[in-house]
Image (cartoon, helix red, strand yellow):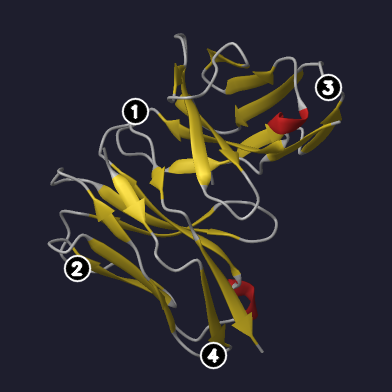
Amino acid sequence: AQTVTQSQPEMSVQEAETVTLSCTYDTSESDYYLFWYKQPPSRQMILVIRQEAYKQQNATENRFSVNFQKAAKSFSLKISDSQLGDAAMYFCAYRRPGYGNKLVFGAGTILRVKS
Amino acid sequence: GAVVSQHPSRVICKSGTSVKIECRSLDFQATTMFWYRQFPKKSLMLMATSNEGSKATYEQGVEKDKFLINHASLTLSTLTVTSAHPEDSSFYICSARAASLNSPLHFGNGTRLTVT
């Protein structure tokens, strides 16, 4: 079974600085998808970034980028120029290809942004 | 863009009663919907996978007679918490995916259930 591990229960970052959230996963598959979701206090799940395992290039979305290390099964999220609105719970998630396959979530990391 | 509507957003019910939560895909057909449960400051725990026109697939440890799931159309799945007890109080979130392969997953806004 696939598992996703987020080893940082909480992280803090100063506004305008950079923070990296870690995620590792375990799978025997070679083709899969990885995601980072943000859940602010409103509890709405927001997709931050997505990475296909067959792509070597790291995904980037504005201030958000990932460091995808397939061999190490590591998928960290870097948030640059942190803003107060980035404060939220962040979940790393894994999914195999195919429309029927479910997301497996990590335990989450609470990110606090200090002004 | 695609939107998933979940209703109600909050519900309070008395112990022993049943509560129905609806999950609708507003602008796409969702052959698969997922129901999650989330405790405060915890991760999302998958309860079941709902497939249109067939029985739901429940995760290990989830009582199918307690949490009834119906996916009668391509735009609606319902979760009914039967004979609710205070320990069923939680945040329930649905998500839906369109039929096309590798289409993204869209989440509802969640339902806060409180059983008194």
Nearer to us: label 3 or label 4: 3
* CB atoms of marks 3 and 1 within 8 Å: no
Q: Quick check: A19 above or below A2?
A: below
Tell me the distance, in whole angstroms, between the alpha carbons under discs 1 and 4.
Answer: 40 Å
Amino acid type at image mark 3: Ser
Q: What is the spatial separation of the Cα atoms under label 3 and label 1, in whole angstroms?
A: 35 Å
Residue B6 x/y as whole percent: 67, 34
Point out which mark residue A100 bears.
Answer: 1
The residue that disc 4 covers is A16
User: Residue B100 at x, y = what percent?
Assistant: 34, 31
Q: In which quarter of the image is residue A16?
A: bottom right
Residue plotted at (48% across, 34% down): B46
From the image, tell me which residue sits under label 2.
A57
Q: What residue lies at 17% left-to-right and 59% top-to-bottom? A: A55
Kind of element beneath mark 4: loop
**Eye-nearest disc, 4 or 2:** 4
Question: How far from the left and from the top, in percent, is residue A89?
Answer: 56, 62
Query: Disc 4 and disc 2: Cα gap in Å?
Result: 26 Å
Residue underneath mark 3: B15
Rounded to the nearest angstrom, the CA distance separating label 3 from label 4 is 48 Å
- Please tell me how crowded label 3 is: few (under 14), some (14-19), or many (20+) other residues with Cα within 10 Å: some
Screen quadrant of the N terminus of chain A: top left
Q: Do labels 2 and 1 share a chain?
A: yes
Compute the Cα span from label 2 to label 3: 52 Å
* Mark 2 vs mark 3: in front: 3
Q: Which chain carries label 1?
A: A
